[in-house]
Amino acid sequence: MSRRAGNPGPRTLAFVESPVQLLNVLEWAHVRAPGAELTLVVLSPTDPMTRGQLRRMAELAREEGHEVRWEEARGGPAAPFQTIGGLAGRLRRAERIVLGDPFSRYVQLLLTITRARDLVVVDDGTATMEFVAQLAGGERFVRWHRKGGRPGPRDLVFAPVSSVARRRLTPAGDRHVEIFSSMPMAELPDGVTHTSNAFTWTRARFGPPRITRSADMVGTSLVETGVVDGDRYLEAVRTLAKAHGTTRYFAHRRESTDKLHRLATETGLEIVRPDLPLELIARRGPIGRTILSFPSTVVHTLPLALAGTEVKVAVCDIDPAWLTDHASPRAQGFLSGVTGTAKDVHRLAAVIV
């Protein structure tokens, strides 16, 4: 296994479960730990689309000189025990832990084992904003689209582990916590440092892209998470595509095949399933002169990844009427906040459908 040349620095373990998390670990290493000895542990999910993107990102990480350890962490009832048992020694020896999803029960369990005094949370999209707010407010860790509901039986059983993870992610004594993020941080917990992610590795590694005359659209999994009604979403996509001359629809890795088939049939858009995170796809090109999106991580990250180009990112607000009956009470406010805090983004009014 290859390692980055130069000063080995502290032993660092990074845990990722999505392609975007892995990308942001590479961005963090480029800015904050050049020359560091870094082992990337991929806690592989079961979703084929996500696994495919993770495989491609793992290749890029190896090209950068990092060690990558692929764990079939969800490959059956015994898989979690085998994964944790195989990592226990490294966890205890690690001096720094980098993680992409503090809401992950898997990651929270691993945090109960480590003795590392240096903890880094890299972006996992807009969830990072919610994590920082909950850590600052002393709240239990709950993903934003689930907030407002009562804890389920599994939440109650896992509560002691989550509590230990919260303590590990709270600065105290010689324990340091860093947030590496492109998201706006309105309120940082005491003692937590924030380093801005400007996608310098992405811009150095790829592009600049060839820009087409048409517009592209970025898909979202808000329907799959139960936040937005499927019919309203399809009609909004159709209306936006017609108004802006959109030709391609970049699917989110969690969008269902049935929904994407219906979108292609009823809107005429070319559905593209990216093999890498969209920040890299856009930077490699070709990419539309305008990129349309609903409130999501990319309204913050694409302007950074595409800095210095003529590409314009435009975001369309989510109309409250699109929300499902069981959407979290916080959904509308959170989505509006995602849009309102994005910089260098052209804001579009909600489409009336």
Image: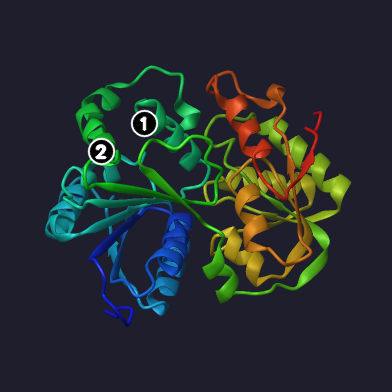
Q: Nearer the viewer, residue 239 or 39?
A: 39
Vertical comparison of 66 with 271: above or below: below
User: Which amino acid type corresponds to the residue marked 2 in the rendered image?
Assistant: Ala
| Residue with the mark numbered 1 | 141
Q: What residue lies at 34% left-to-right and 27% top-to-bottom? A: 140
**Percent from the top left, x then y, of residue 297?**
58, 47
Q: Quadrant of residue 134?
A: top left
**Percent from the top left, x then y, of residue 121?**
38, 49
Residue 43 visible in the picture: no
Q: Quadrant of residue 330?
A: top right
* Res. 64 mark: none
95 left or right of 227 in image:
left
Q: Nearer the viewer, residue 175 or 339?
A: 175
SS assignment at label 1: loop
Q: Earlier in the sequence, mark 2 or mark 1?
A: 1
| Residue with the mark numbered 2 | 165
Vertical comparison of 89 with 218: above or below: below
